Image: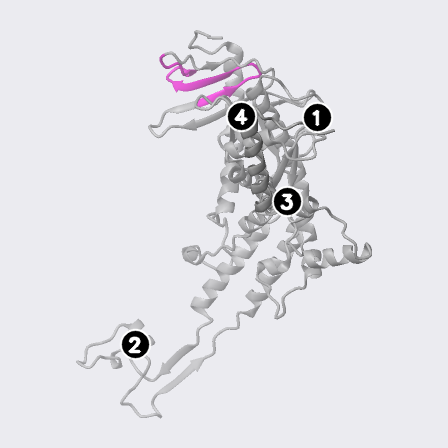
């Protein structure tokens, strides 16, 4: 259906203004969270003992990024299933790979934890209609209006700037998607040539899926995963900055000389030396007698108190994030055993599993939209697409396998393909392995005999001497 117009209706313009305002309200916090993840934040106050001029010594331990990345690297999709299916769905797996979601889902997981929210959109693929486009959208460029009672999205908008400085946007509505551009009169429909700028898809739903991190009731913007570790990061940064300042000022041993004047420090030609060069010379010598000159050295300050303070902050960061303390640099002489590793990582593993469950629901909705664009039909009601994730725990299979085998009396408990599932193989790897087994099961001699026999029978049929069938 072609819509020939270039101006937004009053309702559409009202939606655009609300969505733009919501994006602007969140932009300040988004910028702050982005700086903490990148480690480029600046301390508001660098400490009572450090003058403001010494900000050059500012040092940040980037715990927020370490925390987010550690959880995100445990979020890996294994397979996509339809309800009740025994194997991964080939069409949905194809959608996953055609849209490069194996690389995009980790980005989705990170952005969701950094900003507390993220988006995925589904739309028509003009270059390949059989594979609609699934795109992960930046939360810094997108906002949504959610109907509180129905818990459904009324509208969403993606806003960004082209390289030439033009402000453009996309307005997603339940029955259409509108391309917008900023003009002197505000937002207008971006109609170029035969392209009207309006895609009347009549889905009845906004083709956008909102992902929220640490969602709270009544709130539709989520909470950054870094919220608890940000104050500790600032506190540690102040301690490290003070430590840097101390290293440069009081930690180095100080030398002193009494009984000489500035003019006594000269080069071989008798020219006076700069004060800093005189101080850092390896050897001091004077022609004056020892009773007239006193040379000494003051010990450097002990900075272990700063080390203990940083260690305390690391312990607190470990407690609020659930990351093992060894992730913060506390190494022991002996490596941890398998059981100790699993116990040490139990909280971060549980955190990853919980996030996988929430992300899986959103990915299921996204793939349902994909199927609607691809086939023209919605999946059956009450049958959401299921996402299977890889085990987020650090692989320590030997101890677990040994225990199961002993409890079962030494008999096998898994089928061949069940073992593959436990090993974390994805569907392409399983398909290759089945082909290998089929190749190994073939007998070349028997296949050659069967081929020769078929050739002889075909020759008899061609010559009119078909063999008589036996009783």
Dot in front, 1 or 4: 4
Look at mark 2 in the image and give the residue it sits on: 278
Disc 2 to disc 4, C-alpha distance: 113 Å
Marks 2 and 3, the one that precedes in the sequence: 2
The residue depicted at 54 percent of the width and 39 percent of the height is 102
Look at mark 3 in the image and give the residue it sits on: 390
Q: Which mark is residue 357?
A: none
The residue most toward the top is 4
- Give the side of residue 226 with respect to residue 346, left or right: left
1 or 284: nearer the viewer: 1
Q: SS class of the residue under badge 4? A: loop
Residue 20 appears in the rendering: yes
Look at mark 4 in the image and give the residue it sits on: 463
Q: Residues within 10 Å of mark 1 (few under 14, many from 20)?
A: few
Q: Residues within 10 Å of mark 4 (few under 14, many from 20)?
A: few
Helix, strand or loop: magenta stretch: strand
């Amino acid at each position: 259906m072609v819509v020939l117009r270039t101006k937004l209706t009053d309702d559409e313009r009202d939606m655009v203004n609300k969505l733009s305002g919501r994006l602007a309200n969140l932009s300040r916090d988004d910028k702050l969270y982005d700086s903490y993840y990148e480690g480029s934040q600046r301390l508001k106050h660098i400490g009572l003992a450090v003058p403001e001029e010494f900000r050059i010594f500012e040092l940040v331990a980037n715990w927020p990024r370490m925390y987010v990345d550690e959880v995100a690297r445990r979020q890996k999709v294994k397979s996509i299933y339809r309800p009740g299916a025994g194997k991964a769905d080939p069409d949905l797996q194809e959608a996953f790979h055609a849209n490069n979601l194996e690389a995009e889902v980790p980005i989705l997981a990170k952005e969701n934890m950094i900003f507390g929210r993220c988006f995925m959109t589904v739309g028509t693929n003009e270059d390949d209609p059989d594979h609609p486009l699934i795109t992960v959208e930046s939360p810094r460029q997108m906002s949504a209006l959610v109907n509180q009672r129905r818990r459904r999205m009324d509208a969403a908008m993606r806003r960004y700037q082209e390289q030439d400085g033009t402000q453009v946007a996309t307005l997603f509505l339940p029955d259409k998607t509108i391309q917008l551009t900023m003009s002197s009169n505000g937002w207008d429909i971006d109609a170029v040539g035969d392209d009207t700028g309006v895609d009347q898809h009549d889905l009845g739903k906004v083709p956008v899926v909102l992902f929220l991190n640490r969602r709270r009731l009544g709130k539709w913007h989520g909470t950054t995963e870094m919220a608890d570790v940000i104050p500790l990061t600032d506190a540690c940064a102040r301690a490290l900055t003070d430590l840097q300042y101390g290293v440069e000022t009081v930690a180095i041993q100080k030398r002193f000389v009494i009984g000489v004047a500035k003019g006594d420090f000269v080069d071989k030609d008798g020219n006076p030396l700069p004060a800093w060069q005189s101080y850092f010379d390896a050897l001091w010598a004077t022609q004056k007698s020892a009773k007239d000159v006193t040379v000494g050295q003051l010990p450097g300050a002990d900075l272990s108190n700063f080390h203990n303070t940083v260690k305390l902050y690391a312990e607190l960061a470990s407690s609020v994030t659930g990351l093992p303390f060894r992730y913060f640099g506390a190494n022991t002489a002996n490596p941890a055993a398998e059981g100790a590793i699993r116990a040490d990582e139990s909280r971060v593993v549980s955190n990853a599993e919980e996030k996988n469950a929430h992300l899986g629901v959103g990915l299921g909705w996204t793939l349902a939209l994909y199927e609607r664009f691809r086939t023209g039909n919605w999946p059956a009601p009450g049958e959401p697409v299921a996402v299977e994730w890889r085990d987020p725990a650090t692989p320590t299979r030997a101890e677990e396998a040994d225990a199961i085998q002993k409890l079962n009396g030494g008999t096998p408990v898994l089928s061949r393909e069940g073992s593959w599932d436990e090993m974390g193989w994805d569907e392409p790897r399983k398909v290759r392995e089945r082909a290998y087994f089929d190749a190994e099961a073939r007998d070349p001699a028997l296949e050659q005999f069967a081929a020769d026999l078929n050739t002889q029978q075909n020759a008899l049929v061609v010559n009119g001497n078909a063999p008589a069938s036996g009783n």
